[in-house]
Image: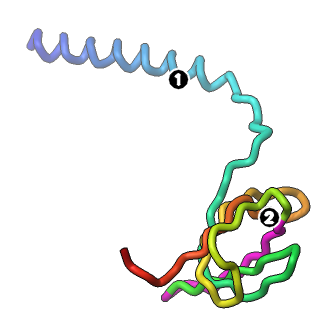
Amino acid sequence: MPRVLLAATAAATLLAFAGAGFAGGASQTPPPSTTSTDQFFAGNVTALSGETLTVGRTVLGKISSTRTFRITPETRVEGNLRVRSKVTVRFVSRDDGDQALHIIVRTGQKK
C-alpha cells in the first residue's frame, strides 16, 4: 500500500511541474518570421518563356497540379532547360507570385 501511495504522489508532483512549465511557455508567443521558407516542386516543364516557367505534375490517384514560377537574374539553372524536360524547382512564395531560386534539370541517365 505505501508503494502505491508513493507512486501516486510522485506522479501528481511530476504532472504539476509539467503543467506549470507548459502554462508558462503558452503565454509567450514567438515573433512572426519575416523570411519565407524555401519550397520544392518537381514535374515536367509545360511552358517556358524568358520570364516564367510553368511546371505540371501528375501523381497517380491524385489531382494534377500546375505551378508557374517567375525567373529572375538571380535564378540558378542547372542543365539544359526546355519544354517537356523534368525539373525540380526550389522557390519562395511572395505576394506577387512564386519566384524560382534554383532550377535543376534532371536527366534520364542512371549513374
Identified at 68% across, 49% down, the residue is 37
Name the one closer to the observer, 91 or 105: 105
Relative placement, left or right, of 39 versus 61 is right
Residue 46 drawn at (x, y percent): 72, 88
Mark 2 or 1: the one toward you: 2
Identified at 68% across, 22% down, the residue is 28
The answer to whether residue 71 is above or below residue 6 is below
Q: Look at the image and give the residue range highlighted in magenta.
A: 60-71
The answer to whether residue 3 is above or below residue 32 is above
Q: Earlier in the sequence, mark 2 or mark 1?
A: 1
Relative placement, left or right, of 95 versus 25 is right
Q: Is residue 65 one of those drawn in magenta?
A: yes
Identified at 35% across, 12% down, the residue is 13
The residue tagged 2 is: 98
The numbered dot on residue 22 is 1
Quadrant occupied by the C terminus: bottom left
Name the one closer to the observer, 89 or 61: 89
